[in-house]
Image: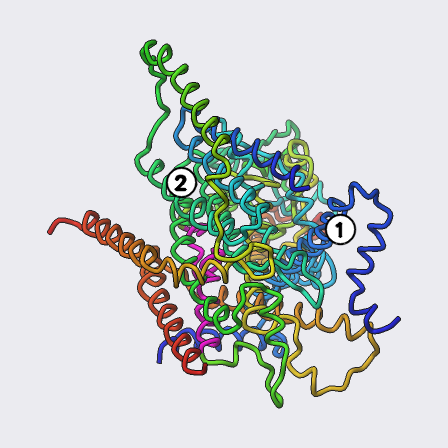
Amino acid sequence: MQLALFLIFGVLCVAGALIFLFQRHPINSALSLVAVMMSLAVIYWTLGAEFLAAAQVIVYSGAIMVLFVFVVMLLNAGEETRTHGSSMAYVAGIPGVAGILALLTYIFLHEREALGAAQLGGHLDGATSNIAELSRVLFTELLLPFEVTSILILVAILGAVVLARKEQ
Amino acid sequence: MTPETIDQIFVLSKGWLLGYVLAALQPIGSAILSVVPVLVVFPLLFAITTVLERKGLGRIQNRYGPNRVGPYGIWQPIADGIKSLTKEDIVPRTADQVVHFLAPLLLVLAAFLAYAVLPIGKNMVITNLNAGLLFFFAVGSMVELAVFMAGWSSRSKYSLLGAMRAVAQMISYEVPLVLASIVVIMASGSLSTVDIVNMQATYTGIWPHWFLFTPWGFAGFILFMVAATAESNRAPFDLPEAESELVAGYHTEYSSMKFAMFYMAEYANMITVACVATLLFFGGASSPFGHLIPAFGGPIVQAILPVLWFVFKVFCFLFLYIWVRATLPRFRYDQLMGFGWKFLLPLAMLNIIATSLVLAFRG
Amino acid sequence: MLGVGILKGLAETARNFLGSYVSKDRLTTFQFPEERAPRIEASRNFPFLVYDGADWHEGMRCVSCLICEKECPPKCIFIEKSTDKKPDATGKPQFYPTTFSIDVSVCMSCQICVEVCPFNAIKMDVDFEQSTSDRFGDLLWNKERLAKSNEYYREIHPTEAAAVDAELAEARAKAAGAKAAAAPVKPVSGVAEEK
C-alpha cells in the first residue's frame, strides 16, 4: 500500500516538475508546481509526518503558490518565447551535470553509515503525536532559531509595508 | 443484540462486507466502504440545503419559496439537477481547456475531502488523524487554488476580477478562522477531532461541557462563524459572486454541470464548516440534555440518537447562515478586507492571549 | 453595544419568517394557475374584433376601412377587403374584411389600432395566457380567432363598453330618425312601412 502510494505520487511529483520546466506560460508552470507541492505533502504523510504534510499544504500550496500566481496574474506575464541557448552550454553542461550527479551518488552511498539517521528527539511511531514532539523540540532546544525566524519574517513584512506605501 | 454490537455497528458491518472482498484488495475495499456513505449522504444534504435555503429565504421575504415540484417543493433539487445535466456545456474558445475543466473538479474534491476527519457520531469517522483539524484547514487552502484556477482559465475580465477578489478574501479570512479555533485546541489539548468531541461529552449538573459555554469558547465561536461565512463566500461576504457587480464572478463562464459543481462545492463548504463549528464548540454528537432523560428505546435508538443530534445542530447552523444571508447587505470590498485584518484578526489574537493566560493560571 | 444593528435586523427577519406561518396575509403571492389576480379594467394585451349579436361573421363591426392597417407601427395587421357588401348592424351595406390577420409575435400592444378605428370594431383584450408551442403557425391569428362578442367586451372593459354601447345606440337612433325623417310621407292607407 505504501509502495503503491509512493510510486503514484512520486511519478506525479516528477512529472509535475518536468512540466513546470517545459511549460511556456508561467501560469501553467505555477499550477504544475502546486501539483508538485501536493504530491510532496502526500509523500510526507506516507512517511508518518502528518503535521509536516498539513503544513506543506497550508503554507506552500495554500499561501506561497497563491502568491506566485497572484503576481503572475497582476503582472500579466505572457507566454515566454523560446530562446536558443548557446550550443556550448549543451556540450559542457550535460556531461558536467551527469558527472556531478554521479559523484554525489557515489559519496552518499559510500558514506551511508557516517550520515546516520536524524532523531527528532523521540520516535515517530504514532504513540506520541508528532505535533507534541515538534513543539517540544521547537520551544526548548531550537528556541533561538525559532525566534530569529519570526523576527526575519517580521522584517520582511515591515519591508513590504514600507515598499507598498504611497509616496506622500 | 448487545449494546456493544449496536455501538460498533458500523465498524462491524464494514468488517462483514469486507469479508467478501479478496484479501489483497482489502485496504482499497475498506477505504471505498468508508468513503461511499459520505459521498452518498452529503450530496443529499446539499440538495436538502438548497430547498431549505430557497424556502427559508422566501418566507423571510414574505413570499412562498418553490412549492410546485413536490409537496412543499421538496423535489426541487431533482428538477434542478435534471436541468443542470441537460443544459449545453459551453466552454469559451479562448479559455484554457485543461484548467477550465479541472477547476470545478478540484473544488468539489477539496470540499468533500474535508469530510474525512469529521466524526458524525460515535465510531463514525472515516479516519481519526492525530492532526485532524489541521488537515481540515489544509484542505481549505486547496479551495482557494481551485477558485483561482476557475477564474483565470476563463480568460474573461469578470472571472479574473472575481477570482482575485475571492482568493484575496479567502486567504485573509483563513487567518482569523484558524486563530479562532486555536482556543479550542488549547483548551482540549489535541488536534484530533475525535478527542475534541470526547472532551465535551461530560456534564456538570445540567450544563454539558461544551466549549461554547466557556467565555473564550463563546468569543471563539462568534469569530469562527464570521470567518467561516467569509471563507465559504456566503452573504454578507459574497462579493466574489455578487450578481449585481461581477455578473457571476469566477464562475461566469461555466454552464450546466460545471456550474452545478461550483454550487455544490460552495454548499458542501458551508456544511463542512457548520459541522466543524458543531464539533469544536457545540460538542459534536453529544445531546444537551441526554443525561437528564433516562435511556429509552433500547440500544438501537441510543446508537442513532447522537447522529440525529449532530444533524440537528448542523441544520441549526445552516438555518443561521440562511437567516444572516436574508438579513444583511453585502460588504464592499475594502470594508471586507478591513474587517478581516483590522478587526477579526486582533480580536482573535486577544482571545488566544486571554485563553492562554487563564489556562496557564489554572494549572 | 457592538453589533446591535445586526441583532435588530435579525430580529426583524425572524419576525417575518415566523409571521409568514402565522398570519396568512403576509404572503401576498397568488398561486398562479389555481388563483388569479383580480382583473384590472385598464390592462391590455392583444387586439380582438368585436361582433354584435350571436353570429360572429354577420355581426362583426369591422368594415375594412384599412385605417388600423395603415396606422399600425410594426405593420402587424393584414387585411383583405371584400368585393361585395353585407349589411351591418344598422342595416346599411358595408364592405367587410375577407381576411383579417394579426401577427401577435410582432404586435406591441400599443393600442393605436383601437384609437384610430372609427367603428369601435377593434378593442384590446386582456387575456395573457396565450403561450403556444408552435412558434410560426400559431402566432398569426385570423379573423375567426380574433372575433369576440360584445358581451365579452362588456365583461372585460365594463365602463368602456358601456360608453361604446351608448355611442353606438345614439348613432343608430340618429340614423333611424334621419331615415324616418327622410322617408317619403305616404297617404294614409294602412300600408305598413318596412322598418
Q: Main secondary structure of the magenta part?
A: helix
Q: Which residues are magenta?
A: B216-244
Q: Residue B46: percent from the left, percent from the top?
A: 64, 56
What's the amino acid at mark 1?
Leu
Work out whether residue B193 can be spotted.
yes
Q: As rendered, which of B43 and C93 lies closer to the eye?
A: B43
Which is in the foreground here, disc 2 or disc 1?
A: 1
The N terminus of chain A - image quarter = top right
From what the image shows, is residue B133 above or below residue B2? above
- Numbered label attached to residue C44: none
Q: What residue is pinned by disc 2? A: B160
Residue A57 in the image: state x and y as whole percent: 48, 47
| Residue C181 appears in the rendering | no
Say which element carries label 2.
Answer: helix
Residue B33: mark in rendering: 1
Q: Residues within 10 Å of mark 1 (few under 14, many from 20)?
A: some
Corner quadrant of residue B302: bottom right
